[in-house]
Image (cartoon, helix red, strand yellow):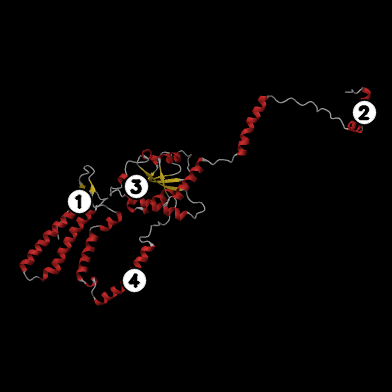
Amino acid sequence: MSQLTPLTCKNLQSSSPTISKLRSIPKFSLPPKMAPPPPPHLTATFLLLLLPLLLTLSFPTTATPSADLLNELENLQSTSPNGVIRLNDNLLRRIISLPRPRPFSLLIFFDAAQLHEKTELQLPTLKSEFAIVSKSFIQNNKESSNPPKIFFFDIEFKDSQKSFGLFGVNSLPHIRLVLPHVDNLKTSDLMDQGDFSRLAESMSEFVESRTKLTVGPLQRPPMFSGKQIVFLLACLMICAPFALKKILAGQTLLHDYKLWLFGAIFVYFFSVSGTMHNIIRKMPMFINDRNDPSKLVFFYQGSGMQLGAEGFAVGGLYTVVGLLLGFVTHGLVKIRSVTFQRFAMAVALIVSFWAVKKVVYLDNWKTGYGIHAYWPSSW
């Protein structure tokens, strides 16, 4: 292999055009000397200060606990058919842990399934009336631009005994109103026991008087559905020709005087026995004795309550007096025997006196007020 001498290389450089062009390429100089990096502890401090800002810009702002719980309650209310939310210990704990004043109020109906069989408490009826108030409030205020925030709850004793203890509930029926500023649940507004007699109307007035909100007209379900009304109208149209034929022939019960006689007696008994009072308040015929559950109580001592048996007893005594009076004035005068007339008059007076005496005695026993005879000293 031949070796290139220095002369040969020199000649090659001078004769090659490519090498001449390479000489014309500018030379690149080295960059200036760079500054030294900052100390590591300053870099870490800067990153720690910048981290909160980066997290704020990277993630959306989370809602407050009050807003989260409010949205959850609104969802639960919308899924309930009547707007009543089932309350439990966990949900109540979350509600009372919110900062006061809370953004909403609570109306709570305390229930116990094992007491539904006690008719004197009327828990199923009161619960359905509570649902009517809830549904009416939601329907009447749903179109408002700023609907008032009050939620209706029911709570079961078997599932939430701790919550019953927080409110100090020891008897039913029981309804509580927890306003936004209330801290101690035992000091929340309690609905008076005497107000339950008017059912949903009393509950509505209780809410309006304590919260200054408007419940609006109560929207009760109709007595008959649309299909039932159509069926009744169809039956009426089918029976109308036959009924008209009987009426024109005078062969209906309305043409029988006995029906009117028994109807008059029934109306009289219905009025004097307080049956309408028992129907409106759904009073039971009797209750169990609190001291001895094996015994039944037919007469309740106290003017604030009347059982169905009481009303029937008083109505029966009044009806006996009325029937005797009607017999004496309309039947006895047609009998020719004077002896029988005198005997019947004496029996009617004695029985009527006994019946009135029993009514007066019962009134004295229930109310504690006595009725005394008054004899004038002079005429």
At label 1, counting other C-alpha atoms closer than 10 Å, the crowd grade (few under 14, some 14-19, many 20 or more) is: some
Residue placed under numbered mark 4 in the picture: 237
Front disc: 3 or 2: 2
At label 2, counting other C-alpha atoms closer than 10 Å, the crowd grade (few under 14, some 14-19, many 20 or more) is: few
For badge 1, the amino acid type reads Asn
For badge 3, the amino acid type reads Asp
For badge 4, the amino acid type reads Met
Can you say whether 78 is above or below 101 in the image? below
Q: Residue at x 34, y 53 (%)?
A: 198
Among the 4 quarters of the image, the one containing residue 275? bottom left
Position of the N terminus by quadrant: top right
Q: Secondary structure at mark 3?
A: loop
For badge 2, the amino acid type reads Leu
Front disc: 1 or 4: 4
Dots 1 and 3: beta carbons under 8 Å?
A: no
Which residue, as the protein is rendered here, is positioned at the far front? 1
Dots 3 and 4: beta carbons under 8 Å?
A: no
**Tag of residue 192:** 3
State the image coordinates of residue 84 (x, y, percent, origin top left): 41, 49
Residue placed under numbered mark 2 in the picture: 12
- Which of the pair 45/96 is nearer the observer? 45
Front disc: 1 or 3: 3
Relative to 303, is 66 on the left or the right?
A: right
Front disc: 3 or 4: 4
Reading the chain from its start, which is encountered first: label 3 or label 2? 2
Q: Secondary structure at mark 2?
A: helix
CA distance separating discs 1 and 4: 54 Å
Residue placed under numbered mark 1 in the picture: 364
State the image coordinates of residue 131 (x, y, percent, origin top left): 39, 51
